[in-house]
Amino acid sequence: MGIIYDPSHYHAYWMAACLDIQVSYRVIDIRTDDWIDRVTQSGCSAFLIWPMLSSAVLKEMVDER
């Protein structure tokens, strides 16, 4: 399971849920320049993301990516 990093640390809720149900996960920061490589090389078949609503810029970036 891929978990998209959230600067407000809400991604920690997804991490806790994966630990509870014993699912392995990888945290990926899509704010980086090489985010596409990180996602494609992660080996994850699904991704979880907490909506980034702390700023309009972050929300727009996540919506586009």
Image: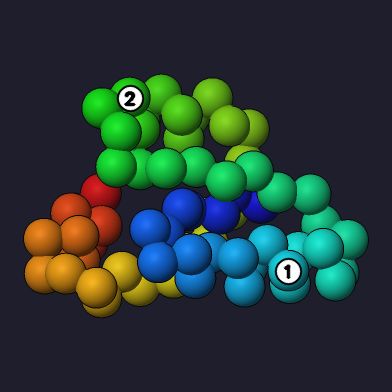
**In this rendering, would 13 be left or right of 62?**
right
Badge 1 or badge 2: first in the primary sequence = 1
Residue 34 sits above or below residue 62 on the image: above
Along the viewing direction, whichever of 53 and 21 lies nearer the viewer: 53
Task: Give the structural element (helix, strand or loop) at label 2.
Answer: loop
Amino acid under disc 2: Asp
Is residue 45 visible to the viewer in this orientation of the structure? Answer: no
Question: Residue 34, labelled with which disc?
Answer: 2
**Residue 63: percent from the left, percent from the top?**
22, 61
Reading the image, the residue beneath label 1 is 16
Quadrant of residue 56 in the image?
A: bottom left
Q: Residue at x 35, y 30 (%)?
A: 36
Q: Residue at x 73, y 69 (%)?
A: 16
Q: How is the image coloured?
A: rainbow
**In this rendering, would 11 be left or right of 7?**
right
Within-10-Å neighbours for mark 2: few <14, some 14–19, many 20+: few
Is residue 61 visible to the viewer in this orientation of the structure? Answer: yes
Q: Residue at x 30, y 33 (%)?
A: 32
**Mark in the foreground, 1 or 2:** 1
Q: Are marks 1 and 2 in contact (CB under 8 Å)?
A: no
Q: Residue at x 73, y 72 (%)?
A: 17
**Residue 35: percent from the left, percent from the top?**
35, 32
Residue 52 sits above or below residue 39 on the image: below
Question: Residue 41, labelled with which disc?
Answer: none
Amino acid under disc 1: Ala
Within-10-Å neighbours for mark 1: few <14, some 14–19, many 20+: few
**Residue 14: percent from the left, percent from the top?**
62, 68
Task: Give the structural element (helix, strand or loop) at label 1.
Answer: helix
| Residue at the outermost front position | 8
Give the alpha-carbon distance from disc 1 to disc 2, as whole Å. Answer: 26 Å
Quadrant of residue 53 in the image?
A: bottom left
